[in-house]
Image (cartoon, rainbow, N blue to C red):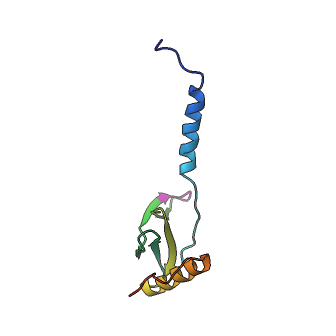
Amino acid sequence: MKGIVPDNAPVQRQEVKAQQQRQFRLIGSLRRIAGLQLWQYDLTTGELSVADVKRTVEIGVDLQPVYKNRTVQRELCLYVQALNRENAMKRVRRYLKECGYNIRNIFNK
């Protein structure tokens, strides 16, 4: 009886494959502005920090190096570009206020 395969085995494999494909999708892209840093604000802890960026190099068609920057994205984080920490705080406050969050306790000094 060990050699018998249930009728729903291919369906289960397809469902698992579909779940794996849904996990990796493009969330969005952002054009980096020269001179600004990318900051991440964690909505759960309220921590503001510089985002981690990985830089990769690939060889292009004309055999010249092509540089690509990828941000390491974390769940429940808001990403903004700003010149310094104070400017990033202002941008996060403005965005959260537009979205309807209670911003009274954010970034209290």
> Where in the figure is residue 38, as x and y percent of width and height?
47, 75
Q: Quadrant of the C terminus?
A: bottom left
Tell me which residue sits at (60%, 22%) in the image: 7
Tell me which residue sits at (48%, 86%) in the image: 87
Q: Nearer the viewer, residue 100 or 13?
A: 100
Tell me which residue sits at (56%, 43%) in the image: 19
> Where in the figure is residue 26, as x and y percent of width and height?
58, 58
Q: Nearer the viewer, residue 83 or 10?
A: 10
Range of residues picked out in magenta: 58-62
Task: Give the dominant element type of the magenta stretch: helix, strand or loop.
Answer: loop
Q: Does residue 54 lie above or below 31 as drawn?
A: above
The part of the image, by quadrant, that contains residue 57 is bottom left
Q: Does residue 1 lie above or below 85 as drawn?
A: above
Is residue 72 in the magenta section?
no
Q: Does residue 77 lie above or below 48 as drawn?
A: above
> Where in the figure is residue 43, as x and y percent of width and height?
47, 70
Position of 109 compared to 30: left or right? left
Q: Residue furthest left?
A: 109
Q: How many marks?
A: 0
Position of 50 compared to 13: left or right? left
Q: Does residue 108 lie above or below 51 as drawn?
A: below
> Where in the figure is residue 106, as x and y percent of width and height?
46, 81
